[in-house]
Image (cartoon, helix red, strand yellow):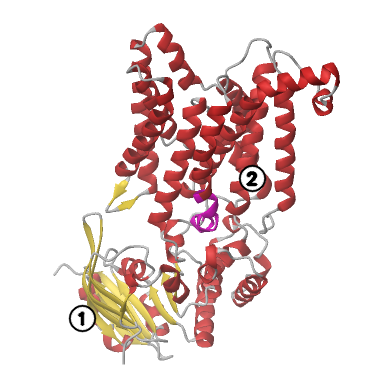
Amino acid sequence: MRPAKPPVRIFLIGVVLLVLALLLGLSVGGVSVSPADLWRGTGEAGETARLIASLRIPRVLLAAVVGGALALAGAAMQALLRNPLADPFLLGTSGGAAAGAALAALAGASPLLSPGAAFAGAAASSLAVVLLSRRGGRVDLNRLLLAGLIANAFFSAVLLGVFSVASTEAARTMLFWMMGSLADATPAKVGALVPYAVLGALPILASAGRLNLFAVGEESAAALGVDTERSKRLVFLAASLLTGAAVAFAGVIGFVGLLVPHAVRAVVGNDQRALLPLSAVSGAALLVAADALSRAAFAPAELPIGAVTAALGAPLFGWLLLRNP
Amino acid sequence: MTPLIEARALAARYGRTPALAGLDAVFAAGEVVAILGENGSGKSTLLKLLARILPPAGGELLLEGRPLGGLPRRETARRIAYLPQTVDLVFPIRSLDLVLQGRAPHNSGFAAEGPDDRRRALDAMRACDVADLAERDASALSGGERRRVFLARALAQEAEVWLLDEPTSGLDPRHRLEFLALLRRAHAERRTTVLLVTHEIDAAANLADRVLLLCEGRALAAGPPRETLTAENVRRAFGVEADVSTDPAGRLRVEPRSPSHA
């Protein structure tokens, strides 16, 4: 079994991995630059390296924040639902966000409005799922999972419907929501995303002690003094906010919220005070590295980021399943 | 004198299904009360209301004369410990961490990390004979070991009231007897108030100071075991005829016969 204290050393390793991933993300792509030139920054090679890297900075940062948000949302949902397979995608939050953004695009709304529409979709999906899962004035966790299934089926129908009637040009934009992409990153987008990510992350990180008590069941947590209804609402809404923000700025990117907490749990155990922050850092590192791979693998062509995370995630997920039956 | 716990016309329901329908009961500090009754008579529900897992749907539930629902949740969790009937652990959890959960209501942010918490948790584990399991994964323990780890959590909680929901169901005879002996010892040392939900009428009758018989969400009878567990009350509560006797060692024996179809 794992030590109970939050392992500071492992957290630092996570941060180092993130920094390495960021350097990798700045270096690779259509034109590769060496990290050494990037570091020196002098001479012709150094200046060129810095110029190219500066163009990549928004994209790399977007990948980091989106990856961290998705992984943290997934880890929180897993702790709340006591289900290692739970994540924002399973509960229909991502689908709601993507459907909201796609509907706004179909209605001819300015692209500036699509983040708002994605948040509205995520919030509507969350609300619908919570209402569907209420029973006798309480949110029932089993019903929550089923309600998520219903929401996913509904929103994927909306997405497919919108996709089929949209103009060719609009359909290309819609493909962005469905496949996920970090290609349109700008400093303004990153700046707009960060406040939402922080607002979603803080309540989850602050709930880590309470979420630990959920590990033995909701009733057990209630008997130990946790206001479980309040905790569930707070964490569920914060995870929805994180997911909505990620989808609004990068489309639907799967596997991050499912895979990262799994991998981190295998290393540090299930203490949420270690698991949650480390999931955020590792999710950031994973998505930055996956994005670098998507640009480097068939450069100058780019792979869809969602395809990369799925191709990385599925085998690793299978391996984790075999290792921890 | 104000009783420690008092239920007045207490009602509860799951969705639309009523579980308690006007229960009146009183529990004094330091006594062991066995709560008996048919499946669905409201025994576990009463414990869940006291543990604040379920809110009452009507009536009053008082702790030292004050409505339980009006007290801060952490405060009642420091005073009332709940031992759940069944627990499925999905993720691995170290037994010591599970016992440390009992310290959570005592600390801000529900942390359970201090050296003092650790010492109390290990003391509780020693008292429950599970100190050697401290580093083991609780989700991989046997049923009997896990029950004792959960009792250690209740001990570490240092509450004055214990709510035990069928703590010995599913245990083999040896572990059952060991658990009951452990419970007796812990109660003798700490003078806690114990509310014990069980189907083991004989064991309850000989362990408890008083018996509360529930039927269809109401109190059918309450009092000392010998006066309460009469053949008449057993028939009304469980729908079975029973022979009530005292064995040579002076223990009360309640032996059910065939179901009555009155």
What residue type is disc 2 on?
A: Leu
Residue nearest the viewer, comparing B125 with A98: A98
Residue occupying the point 46% across, 28% down: A248
A110, above or below B174, in the image? above
Q: Position of residue A186 (x, y in %)?
A: 57, 24
Q: Position of residue A301 (x, y in %)?
A: 64, 10
What residue type is disc 1 on?
A: Glu
- Write the start and end of the magenta stretch as one range: A203-215
Residue occupying the point 42% across, 44% down: A237
Chain identifier of the residue bearing label 1 in the image: B
B87, above or below B182, in the image? above
Which image quadrant: the C terminus of chain B?
bottom left
Residue position marked by numbered label 2 in the rendering = A278
A13, above or below A66, in the image? below
- The answer to whether residue B42 shows anywhere in this view is yes
Task: Return the residue found at the far top.
Answer: A168
**Which SS class for mark 2?**
helix
Give left or right: position of A300 versus A186.
right
Residue position marked by numbered label 1 in the rendering = B232
Give left or right: position of B16 versus A302.
left
Crowd class of label 1 (few under 14; some 14 to 19; many from 20; radius 10 Å): some
Q: Position of residue B120 (x, y in %)?
A: 62, 75
Marks 2 and 1 share the same chain? no
**Residue A269 lies in magenta, yes or no?**
no
Q: Main secondary structure of the magenta part?
A: helix
Residue A232 bears which disc, if any? Answer: none
Give left or right: position of A317 versus B187.
right
